[in-house]
Image: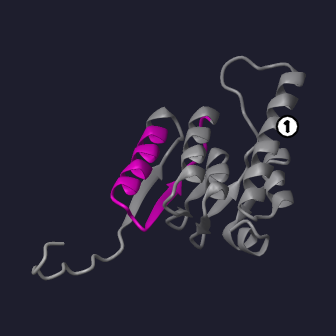
Amino acid sequence: FLLGAAPSRAQAPQVLEIQVDGMIHPVSAEFVTAGIDQAVRQRAALIIIQVNTPGGLDTSMRQIIEKIIASPVPVVVFVAPSGSRAASAGFFILLSADVAAMAPGTNTGAAHPVFMGSEPDEVMKQKVANDAAAYLRSIAGQRNRNVQLAEKGVTESQPVAEAEALSGGLI
């Protein structure tokens, strides 16, 4: 501010929106993490990640979640528009947000790990499922969400509609 100059008008708070429509994979993870970095650089007041996904890769999902949790800018994950879903990896991403929200007519959950390529043995399947359940319990607990209902999304592949997610303390 220069002495004698009129102060500039206060800028309205900025909200950065990121849309994820499709599989969670390395490109979508880079897109989301770059968007969060941009919001931080621009000193945005809020980030909204609008999600419609059947799920995707564990490594890409974890990249996104790490970035959301570490973000100094509050992050809202919003499952929208009506008819959309945040299944599997999208369920984890939804629950990792500071604010988890769902439009009417959306669903989430059904997050039991699936394998691509050759089928692993039963011990490996159990290890992966237990790891995913523990990870989701940690995320849900950190965000003060219903840990037991969240875990059922992994251990029982339980999907939930938006009304159930709201009454069940997931969103």
- Check disc 1: other Cα within 10 Å, few if <14, some if 14-19, many if 20+: some
Where is residue 33 shown, x and y percent of the image? 46, 44
Tally the marks. Answer: 1
Q: Nearer the viewer, residue 42 or 157?
A: 42
- In the displayed structure, 154 sits above or below 113; it is below
Residue 42 magenta-highlighted: yes
Residue at figure coordinates x 45%, y 66% from the top left: 46
Where is residue 17 shown, x and y percent of the image? 40, 61
Q: Nearer the viewer, residue 31 or 117?
A: 31
- In the displayed structure, 163 sits above or below 53; it is below
Q: Is residue 9 left or right of residue 169?
A: left
Residue at figure coordinates x 57%, y 50% from the top left: 70
Q: Give the quarter of the figure containing the C terminus.
A: bottom right
**Magenta residues, start to end:** 28-57
Where is residue 61 shown, x and y percent of the image? 60, 41
Residue at figure coordinates x 39%, y 56% from the top left: 39
Where is residue 135 shown, x and y percent of the image? 76, 44
Identify the residue under disc 1.
Answer: 130
Q: Is residue 54 visible?
A: no
Residue at figure coordinates x 72%, y 33% from the top left: 114
Please tell me whether mark 1 sits on a helix, a strand or a loop.
helix
Q: Is residue 68 visible?
A: yes
Residue 51 magenta-highlighted: yes
Q: Nearer the viewer, residue 30 or 156?
A: 30
Q: Is residue 140 left or right of residue 32?
A: right
Q: Quadrant of residue 86?
A: bottom right
